[in-house]
Each structure stands twice: as structure tokens, then as C-alpha cells.
Image (spheres, rainbow, N blue to C red):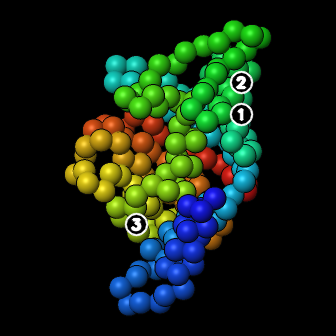
Amino acid sequence: MRKFLLCVLMMILLTGCKTTGVSEAEELALTIRGEYLAMDACTVQAAVTADYGQRVYEYEMAVSVSGGETVLVLAAPETVAGLTARLTGKDSVLEFDGVSVETGTLDDAGLTPVSALPALLEAARSGYITACAMEEDGTQLRIDCGDPTGSSGTGTETVLWFDAFTHALTRGEISVDGFRVILCEFSDFTM
């Protein structure tokens, strides 16, 4: 709880300071981070592409996040429609009629298509911002997150796009050692 309060206090201090060195994109990134830190729940429609190198899988799902639990209901491909994934903390289960399914990991930390949205939300809340900029005529904010001690193209890197007006997450990518393993496109994002 202290970390959260300290984070919120730092955000208020940073957003309250109008210095000439802070860009519009950086101010918006800090505002959005504060909103996502305070968010308790959200729902979204997601189209997820998972690239395992020699295999690429595409999924569509409805996602609901509430507190520490994330529930994903797959809608496509048709062969897995109705599968439900429940994630609580580090544990995740893909289940349908009592049968569990393993999708395989995309990195050493256990990233899967099922855990992609929670990973993207975590990056929005606390990822180390390496760059941010306004794109698409100022309608989208792009935030790049990565390891503060690493170099570009190494380790796990995340890129997030937010609607500049509603602050809804519209797209996210996760790359591992310079190779994009997850692409998520979102619609109907509500907090």
C-alpha cells in the first residue's frame, strides 16, 4: 500500500510540475499511468496474434479484469470458441468443460497468449518508460517500455498505444530480443 501511495504522490508531483523539459506526450503518459494505477476493473475485446517463430496463432477474446482476476473467453478461432481462461496472480488455467489446455510459453518468464493482456496492463501501470510520442495526427499516444539497464532490441520490450482523448488502450506489442511475439489490438475498452 505504501508503494502505491508513493507512486501516486510521485505522479501528482510530476504532473503538477510544468517544466519546459516535459513534452505533451510525457505529460499524457504520466496522466494515463496514474489512471491505470487507480483502475480496479476493465473489460475489452481483444484480437491477439502470438508468434512462436515457426507457428503463428490468432485469437479473438472478450476479457474482463476485476481486482486480481482476469477472465478471458475465446471467440475465435471457431475450434476453441468458448474456452475460458482464468488468471489469478501468476497462476493461469485455460479450461473448457473441465479440460485444461497448455498453449506454450513465448519467453523465459512464462509469457503466453493468455497472459498477454495482464502483461500489457502491468506495463501500462509500472513499466519503465523508455520513450513516448504522439502519433496518427495526435490521436494516439505511443509508450515504449523496457529494461532501464538493457539496450534496445534485447530482453522483453513492450509498446503500448492509447487513445489520446479517452485514454483507452488500443494496441500493444511485446517483443523478446527484438522479435515481436505478441500483438494485441483492442476495441470496446472500458474502465
Q: Does residue 83 sit above or below 43 in this rendering?
A: above
- On the image, the x and y values in percent for residue 26 come to 44, 74
Instruction: Please identify the quadrant where the C terminus is shown.
Output: bottom right
Does the rendering let one see residue 84? yes
Please report whichever mark, 2 or 1, sits nearer to the chain's N-terminal start: 1
Q: Report the side of 24 relative to 46 (left or right).
A: left
Q: Report the side of 110 relative to 68 (left or right).
A: left
The residue under label 3 is which amino acid type? Cys
Residue closest to the eye, 108 or 85:
108
Q: Callout 2: few (<14), some (14-19), or many (20+) C-alpha neighbours within 10 Å? A: many
Residue at position x 42%, y 42% in the image:
174
Q: Is disc 2 in contact with disc 1, using a CB cutoff of under 8 Å?
A: yes
Q: CA distance from mark 3 to mark 1?
A: 30 Å
Q: Callout 3: few (<14), some (14-19), or many (20+) C-alpha neighbours within 10 Å? A: many
**Residue that badge 3 annotates:** 132
**Residue that badge 1 annotates:** 71
Q: In the current view of this chain or complex, which residue is farthest to the right? A: 97
Please report whichever mark, 3 or 2, sits nearer to the chain's N-terminal start: 2
**Residue that badge 2 annotates:** 84
Residue 56 is drawn in which quadrant?
top left
Question: Quick one: SS at disc 3?
Answer: strand
